[in-house]
Image (cartoon, helix red, strand yellow):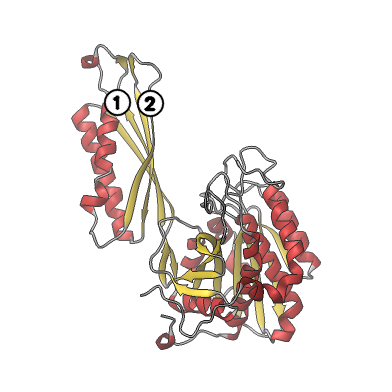
Amino acid sequence: MTSCGISGMKNVSPATIAAPVSDLLPDLIALRRDLHAHPELAFEERRTAGIVASGLRLLGLEVQEGVGGTGVVGTLRCGKGSSSVGLRADMDALPMVELGQRAYASRSPGKHHGCGHDGHTSMLMGAARHLVRSHRALGLEGTVHFIFQPAEEGKGGAARMIEDGLFERFPCDSVYALHNWPDLPLGHAQTRPGSIMAAADRFDITVRGKGGHAAQPHHTPDAILAASQLVTQLNTIVARRIDPGESAVLSVTRIEGGHSHNVLPAEVQITGTVRSFDPAAQDRIEAALHAAAQGVALASGTEVQVDYLRYYPATINTAAEARLALEAAQAVGLQAQVAPRAAFTSEDFAFMLQRKPGAYLWLGQGRADPGPEGERALHHPCYDFNDDALPLGVRWFCEVAARALAGAITPTASAPR
């Protein structure tokens, strides 16, 4: 596995890639900025879903609302072909304050499109518009399902749509999604066969003592001391319990307890996350975490309760579809590369990939001149989606649909390197 580009690929400017859909851009930019100004959290995307559903109906598509809560699916039937493909975009925003000063900054305090889902939604709307007007000229035969998913940010909207019969009601031979990637320059794209995003687990630990006077620690088990010892032990689990050849991360992200300088608190809360790619490593980490908690409880005389939640599995691309995703990126002029490694961030598109073949692509949006503070990372309070990436995502979605319906998956021997 290498990170070099696909053989024979030529440099193509983003403007050249955008040309076939350039007439759509004013409306798509306006849509993206409107969504940015009116962010909605997981399973609250009623305004966004209404805009999406209305736009799809205006295109003459079959539209189903309320899938998995606030999800929307639009269906385009092309000719008499039996092949089908799903194209997915996420719609929800993050529960965080936006600090950006743009005219279209969030008008909803405590809500911010800090991950670019406003851009993803707009790109898939653009793809629907372009495929509706061009599918006959392209000779498409089959069905395209445009899947607008709620609640990606930690709430499992993909799983809810699946539970609501997504793939029974809207059969898909394969499914594809993308995510803007500020670490990649505009005009670049990456994916890889196998794992591309990590499984995400959350742990919440409660350490309970009895509470008492800080000047009389011998009268009460010290919950803060026990919690501190536990945090130290947790940070050795990956280093000492996981094969060095495997990849995993355990991070303690919150420790909270006590309200006074002279009181030993009765309770301390510890929260954190675990990221991994191998289910066996995931099992070992969870078991080690429970064992560490039991050991500290026994040694300190405290009671330790552990709640461990595996909320997203690893996002695993199937090899043939990852190849199709890269070849589609190359075909529209993107600098397509095999990603050299997976990311430890997580993505609930993983649930769809557990049910169907498919691939998840990183689409570069890094600006050539990002300003004195550099390109804002995903989930940064000043993050803003780069509108120059809109037409690139539209073109990629459309090319993926055309290739998937045509069965354009190359043999393994000709895989990009």
Please tell me the numbered disc located at residue 365. Answer: none
Q: Nearer the viewer, residue 200 or 158?
A: 200
On screen, 65 above or below 23? above
Please tell me the numbered disc located at residue 257. Answer: 2
On screen, 264 above or below 64? above
Residue at figure coordinates x 24%, y 32% from the top left? 297
Residue at figure coordinates x 41%, y 53% from the top left? 200
* Quadrant position of residue 1: bottom left
Q: Can you identify the residue that label 1 sits on? A: 223
Crowd tier of the residue under label 1, counting other residues whose Cα lies within 10 Å: few below 14, some 14–19, many 20 or above: many
Q: Nearer the viewer, residue 27 or 274?
A: 27
On screen, 195 above or below 113? below
Q: Is residue 281 left or right of residue 392?
A: left
- Mark positioned earlier in the residue sequence (2 or 1): 1
The percent position of residue 120, horizontal first and vertical second, equals 62, 61
Q: Find out whether the residues at labels 2 and 1 contact each other: C-beta distance under 8 Å.
A: yes
Residue at figure coordinates x 81%, y 66% from the top left? 58
Label 1 element class: helix
Q: Is residue 401 left or right of residue 231?
A: right
Q: Nearer the viewer, residue 124 or 28?
A: 28
**Amino acid beneath label 2:** Gly
CA separation in Å, label 2 and label 1:
9 Å
The percent position of residue 60, horizontal first and vertical second, equals 79, 70
**Amino acid beneath label 1:** Ala
The percent position of residue 98, horizontal first and vertical second, equals 61, 42
